[in-house]
Amino acid sequence: MLDLLLAGFGNVLSPQIFVLITLGVAVGIVFGAVPGLTAVMAIALCLPMTYTLGPAAGISLLIALFVGATSGGLISAILLKIPGTPSSIATTFDGAPMMEKGEGAKALGVGIVFSFIGTILSIGALMFIAPSLARVALSFGPHEYFAIAVFSLTLIATLSSGSMIKGIFAGVAGFAISTVGIAPVDAITRFTFGRVEINAGFSILTVLVGMFAVAEVIRVAENAHRKGAAPPAPPLLVKIKGFGFSMAEFLGQIPNAIRSAVIGISIGILPGIGAGTSNIISYIVSKKRSKTPEKFGKGTIEGVVASETANNAGIGGAMIPLLTLGIPGDAVTAILLGGLMIHGIQPGPMLFITQGPLVYTIFAALVVAAVMMLILEFVGLRIFIRLLAIPKHILLPIILVLCAVGAFGLGSRIFDVWTILAFGILGYAFAKAGMPTAPFIIGFILGPMAETNFRRGLQLSAGDFTGFLTNPISGTFLALAALSILWQVYGALRPHKIATLPNVQD
Amino acid sequence: MSRNSELIIGLAMLGAGIGYLFMTMQLPRRGAVDATFFPYALGTAMVGLGLLQVIVTLRRTGFLPSTASERLQPRQILTVMATLGLVACFIAALRPLGFPVAAALFLFAQFCLLAPATQKPRLFLYVVLAVVAAVLIFVTFRYGFRLMLPGGPLTPYLP
């Protein structure tokens, strides 16, 4: 293991890959810091750039973008009270009040350092948990994979914010869109309307870029000329010396950081619940465990530590099911999965056996990216703030053009660019309907996995459906999936009474 | 969200499910578990969820009327439609005009369209930004990453 890790560090510290990681982290931080731009967009845009690179260099670049973008959200969350990414929502709760109290530099320093600690702790977990989980996963067959896919699908939909019905529908719709193209096993073309361009189905990239980037441009267009809209606020500049906090404050936050890292890793492992959830849960737990809960929300470093440690700890957590089972936990890891597959790497249990050196190169790339994140965020704060000052009406059309370039790069086809527009309209419609996008994306990714393994499982059990229930692992996961749905249905019906309470009181 | 909005969403979900089921019925059958098995299951689920959304909305009370800020103003709808039109024109123009020209025109038009109503449009700046961004992206991808973006009428003059 140590030999492989050293070899991995040897790979990523080569001049080409090191420069790529440095650039990737820098670009990722910018994407994380600019509200509206996400890690998904950073990775989606840069994915075509990896086509000409080798697997180690290409994957290192994508990982650097992931690490940078996850942490970059703290900059705008603290300075502008706007979370750059969903993973920094809870950072605004205490980061912004600290900024108002004149402790912005301290909040930034705390956020940067504990983002780094969260990332490193999660990489440690990834290195020690992933190989053993991979060994367990090796015994999994089509029955187990089908059940895991179904369970993940229900978990994603039911844990979506807002309406559970809409969450499940979004997941089912994503699954339905994934059925376009040639069917597994019997190779019948479905829903192609005679268009050969979609015989292979829709690309993950066009779906993601459309649903996130194009939909965001449409949302900005919607609000550009709304009457009564406030003019955009100018960015604030702050001065920072050192990391802005004392050693005693740092040591006092260690238990909080470890607890938050455990929460971040645990939630990161579960498909569909990414850093967007873990930072809020970690913040709530931290507040409950704090000796001074009354300070939360008024500007305490405990809140910033909880949020930033947890969201970055989700990086290693999310990589565990991705690498060992080939299951993407969220949209970011979904596109990372696409990136791995483009480079001929099939994540799953066999990855650790067939491509051990590459796996440890990924681990090394994560560590180097985390270190570069610490250095670049510390050195480049003033530059990031100026980038935040670029108006959205300038930035987003340029992003859209870049998205079109990314889509065109898939197969040098204008058809793929039309596809991102179509999915952009769908993403906008989802936003207007209050329908979460994440279940759709995960449904789109996990759908083919569920269908293919279901068909294969039936072939293995000679058409006997009960094989999925009698297999202990698949039976357990399917039972959990059913329980999850029932519990959420029950939960969805209960608020009906609560919603009527104000009328009763009136 | 108002009751009517939730009802429309429910009906749209139901419509999507029925449409998907209808298209599934056009597929050839090859036994009980074939290429139509999952589409039938998914279509049925979509119809079921659409119905559930409609029923839950009809049964639920305590809806608040939508506020003025929630309702789309006519100018907002126009801006959204114009943005979609511009994106469509940009995509359609990629081959005939080439990427640099199509992108520069699209960027300029989009900058002007999305400029907040509270700000005075800075046309000269937008022209410069649009041209510089389009050329920079074209050069970076075509010559940096070997992605053969369409050059259009400029192709004979490109290195």
Image (cartoon, coloured by chain):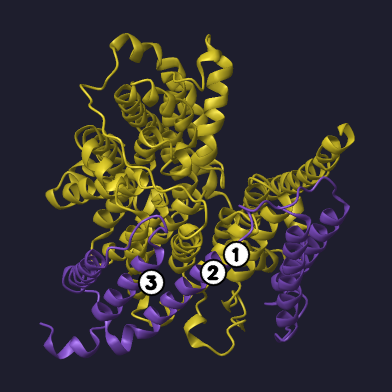
Chain colours: A yellow, B purple
**Dot 3: element:** helix
Camera-side mark, 3 or 2: 2
Residue A392 coordinates in the image, percent (x, y) = 37, 55
Observer-nearest of A217 and A480: A217
Residue A317 appears in the picture as rendered:
no
Observer-nearest of A347 and A134: A347
Q: Chain of mark 3?
A: A
Residue A371 coordinates in the image, percent (x, y) = 25, 34
* Quarter of the picture holding the N terminus of chain A: top left
Q: Which mark is residue A225?
A: none
Q: Residue tagged by mark 1? A: A429
Residue A258 coordinates in the image, percent (x, y) = 44, 21
Q: How many marks?
A: 3
Label 3 and label 1: CA atoms lie apart by: 21 Å
Label 3 and label 2: CA atoms lie apart by: 16 Å
Name which quarter of the figure residue B97 lies in: bottom left
Vertical side of A222 occupied by A26: above or below: above
Q: Residue tagged by mark 3? A: A407
Name which residue type carries label 2: Ile
Category of crowding for the residue at label 3, using alpha-carbon neighbours closer than 10 angstroms: few (below 14), some (14–19), many (at least 20): many
Q: Are marks 1 and 2 in contact (CB under 8 Å)?
A: yes
